[in-house]
Amino acid sequence: MASGCGARLPHSKALTSPYPGSQVRRSPVPRAKVGWQTEWEDYRPVEYTAGAVLAGPSWADPQIDEEGFAPKFNQRDGEVDRQSLHGLYLVENGRPRNPAGRTGLTGRGLLGRWGPNHAADPVVTRWKRDGSGQKVAHPVSGKHILQFIAIKRKDCGEWALPGGMVDPGEKISATLKREFGEEALNALQKSPEEKAELEQQLQKLFSQEHFVVYRGYVDDPRNTDNAWMETEAVNYHDETGESMEKLPLEAGDDAGLVQWVDISEELQLYASHSHFLQLVSEKLGAHWGQGPAAECQQ
């Protein structure tokens, strides 16, 4: 299992307004002042934490100043992993600081955890084939076209990978399989017999050879100065197409639609998901765009 490389840390989607699911507008942050290393005495970010988070669901931390709440940042805190994939992050006035820079918003927004919020994104791929079973090549690049399983998110209507949040104490491998089953196969709504059959198919799919595409910070529109998304994206590729031929795709949980989609640089996807697909395309020598592929930088 080889590890992939990731995008540079600074963000752009984490600067968009209004904040998702609200009318709250971030304080504007000029590109030159995103990085914390640039002094900005007049920086006055807006404070916002969504009501759904403040209601205290099981997946969310209390407010930072709530009595009895003493999070252990930069380490395992019971079952909650507060470590960043980028190493140590600063904590100022009891609040963790986004390692990618300013976002124009403090608090947690829609994110449950102060500091890193860990997710896992399965990138399930196969080769596009014609009616006779032959791989289809792109007419310009001449490279074979990859397809991946995409979901259309209910919350924002954008196409994305069928991933989700890592539960406290859960292994990444378990999250990848669980989220794929829930969002791409509608596993939560299946009968016990159907779930048992799906589990066999998932076990076969997720026990295949795979590689880690990316581990790190995600440029996500939900990020704030004090809470941010990090993910591990893992590619499961079906070289022959036989393992996924009978995969019963059915949207479920957070997904409104699910389908196989051709991979190319024209795709507009949620958060950093397009970048993950570019890395997979480069790894497998597949079509991405008409220009030279970007080099991976560690």
Image: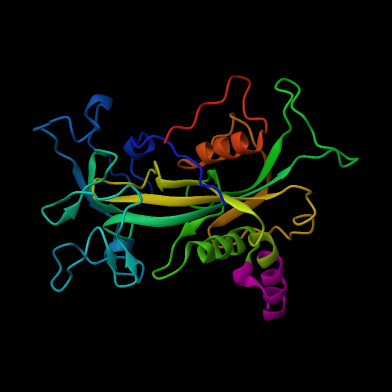
Image quarter of the C terminus = top left
Picture quadrant where residue 50 is located:
bottom left
How many numbered discs?
0
Residue at 63%, 61% (x, y): give it.
206
| Left/right of residue 76 with respect to residue 232 in the rendered view | left
Quick check: 60 above or below 145? below
Of all residues shown, which one is farthest toward the bottom? Answer: 192
The foreground one among 16 and 70 is 70
Of all residues shown, which one is farthest toward the front? Answer: 1
Picture quadrant where residue 267 is located:
top right
188 in magenta: yes
| Left/right of residue 15 with respect to residue 272 in the rendered view | left
Residue 238 horizontal/vertical position (percent): 72, 50
Residue at 59%, 54% (x, y): give it.
256
Of all residues shown, which one is farthest toward the left? Answer: 41
Residue 282 horizontal/vertical position (percent): 60, 34
Region in magenta? 187-202
The foreground one among 180 and 215 is 215
Residue 146 horizontal/vertical position (percent): 69, 38
Color scheme of the displayed model: rainbow
Quick check: 181 above or below 210? below
Of all residues shown, which one is farthest toward the right? Answer: 132
Residue at 18%, 70% (x, y): give it.
69
| Left/right of residue 132 with respect to residue 69 in the rendered view | right
The foreground one among 34 and 126 is 126
Secondary structure, magenta segment, majority class = helix
37 in magenta: no
Residue 39 horizontal/vertical position (percent): 12, 31
| Left/right of residue 21 with respect to residue 267 in the rendered view | left
